[in-house]
Image (spheres, rainbow, N blue to C red):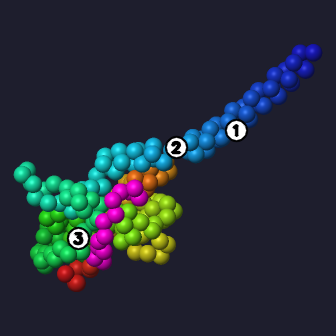
Amino acid sequence: MRRSILIVAILTSAVVVALVACADSKSTSQKVAAISPDSLIKRGEYLVTSIGCDDCHTPKKMGPQGPELDLDRRFSGHPSTEVLGKPDQSVFKNGYILFGMGLTTAVGPWGASYAANISSDTTGIGMWTEEQFFRAIRKGLSKGLEGNRPLLPPMPWFVYKNLNDDDLRSVFAYLKSTKPVKNVVPQPKGLKEL
């Protein structure tokens, strides 16, 4: 009798453990599916403003207290019309890099890199898929396309790749909801091209 009770108790415990495991996996997928588009966008806005995407991807204008975000061109990246002078490359020998006045371009031993247009325009990420966005951030690939060049400094993709899937999905949803700003960002240049 005791043996039968013990077997029933073990089997019941195994069934309960299996049900809990199944319920956990279902609740996780249901939780992801239950996140509304509005909630994704709000979470994405919070993340984008918290992790500093505007710092590099939004051109600046001079305000009463110095450079401030030019919200008319928010997330449009380095302005295609902005012509930069030739940088003094001797600073690289002393361990420095240079930033343009709008903070949308950086020059260092890798050459010149320009902040991408991440607005919802087709010249930005308007035609990107979520898969491309994940690949760009997780693998550091330009436009999130296999075989493309790596993302260049100062883009900290190697930090952002640690965001969980829901956070990346939220960032992408928010960026896709932003005002489209037409701007074709220049291609990076090697040091010899500067």
Q: Amino acid at mark 2?
A: Ile
Q: 29 left or right of 22?
A: left
- At label 3, the amino acid type is Pro
Question: Which region of the structure is painted magenta?
Answer: 175-187
Crowding near the residue tagged with mark 1, few <14, some 14–19, many ≥20 C-alpha atoms within 10 Å: few
Q: Secondary structure at mark 1?
A: helix
**Which sits earlier in the primary sequence, circle 1 or circle 3?**
1
Q: State whether residue 133 appears in this view.
A: yes
Q: CA distance from mark 2 to mark 1?
A: 20 Å
* Residue shown at 45% from the left, 43% from the top: 39
Farthest residue, direction bottom: 193
> Neighbour class for label 3 at 10 Å: few (<14), some, many (≥20)?
many
* Residue that numbered label 3 is attached to: 79
Numbered circle sitting on residue 42:
none
The residue most toward the right is 1
Left or right, 158 with respect to 31, comes to left
- Quarter occupied by residue 84: bottom left
Query: Considering depth in this image, is 76 or 102 the residue closer to the camera?
Result: 76
The residues bearing labels 1 and 3 have C-alpha atoms spaced at a distance of 51 Å
> Looking at numbered disc 1 in the image, what kind of residue is underneath it?
Cys
Q: Which residue is mark 1?
A: 22
Q: Secondary structure at mark 2?
A: loop
Q: Does 94 appear above or below 34?
A: below
Tag 3 and tag 2, C-beta contact below 8 Å: no
**Label 2 neighbour load within 10 Å: few <14, some 14-19, many 20+:** few
* Left or right position of 2 against 96: right
Q: Main secondary structure of the magenta part?
A: loop
Which numbered disc, 1 or 3, marks the residue closer to the eye?
Answer: 3
Q: In x, y percent, where is residue 2?
A: 89, 15
- How far apart in space, not on screen, are marks 3 and 2 (Cα)? 35 Å
Residue at mark 2: 35
